[in-house]
Image (cartoon, helix red, strand yellow):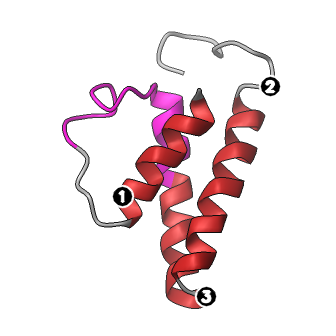
């Protein structure tokens, strides 16, 4: 679920869409929103340096890797806002 949501919003953001509301209205947790911001930042840099195709590929790869890393234990970290 994390990968799908982060990929969706990262592609939309990179394409110039302005997300509405806050991360919760986007259907993301705080942790997922943090991943989204990191992925979008990296994709914007990749687009400037290597082009749009590289940015799209980077989104797919990093969203999966970062979500896997963050949720490898299968549950939330300590505290409700993680």
Question: Relative to 81, is 70 on the left or the right?
Answer: right
Q: Which one is nearer the viewer's eye here, 64 or 35?
A: 64
Question: From mark 1 to mark 2, how far is it between C-alphas?
Answer: 26 Å
Rendered view: 77 above or below 51:
above
Question: From mark 3 to mark 2, how far is it between C-alphas?
Answer: 31 Å
Q: Give residue 13's position: percent from left, percent from top.
A: 36, 58
Residue 11 sits inside the magenta stretch = no
CA neighbours of label 3 inside 10 A, class few (<14), some (14 to 19), many (20+): few
Rendered view: 80 above or below 65:
above
Q: Residue at x 29, y 66 (%)?
A: 16
N-terminal of the pair, mark 3 or mark 1, is: 1
SS under mark 3:
helix
CA neighbours of label 1 inside 10 A, class few (<14), some (14 to 19), many (20+): some
Image: magenta residue range = 20-37
Q: Give residue 69's position: percent from left, percent from top.
A: 77, 36
Residue at numbered disc 3 = 50
N-terminal of the pair, mark 3 or mark 2, is: 3
SS under mark 1:
helix
Residue at numbered disc 2 = 72
Q: Give residue 76's position: percent from left, percent from top.
A: 63, 14
Rendered view: 30 above or below 47:
above
Name the front one of labels 3 and 2. 3
Residue 26 sits inside the magenta stretch = yes
CA neighbours of label 2 inside 10 A, class few (<14), some (14 to 19), many (20+): few
Question: Relative to 7, is 54 on the left or the right?
Answer: right
**Labels 3 and 2 touching (C-beta < 8 A):** no
Where is residue 58, by image quadrant? Answer: bottom right
N-terminal of the pair, mark 1 or mark 2, is: 1
Q: Which one is nearer the viewer's eye here, 29 or 7?
A: 7
């Amino acid at each position: 679920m994390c990968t799908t949501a982060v990929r969706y919003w990262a592609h939309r953001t990179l394409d110039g869409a302005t997300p509405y509301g806050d991360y919760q209205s986007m259907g993301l947790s705080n942790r997922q929103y943090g991943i989204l911001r990191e992925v979008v930042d990296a994709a914007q840099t990749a687009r400037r340096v290597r082009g749009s195709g590289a940015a799209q590929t980077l989104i797919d790869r990093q969203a999966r890797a970062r979500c896997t890393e963050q949720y490898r234990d299968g549950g939330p970290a300590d505290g409700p806002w993680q």
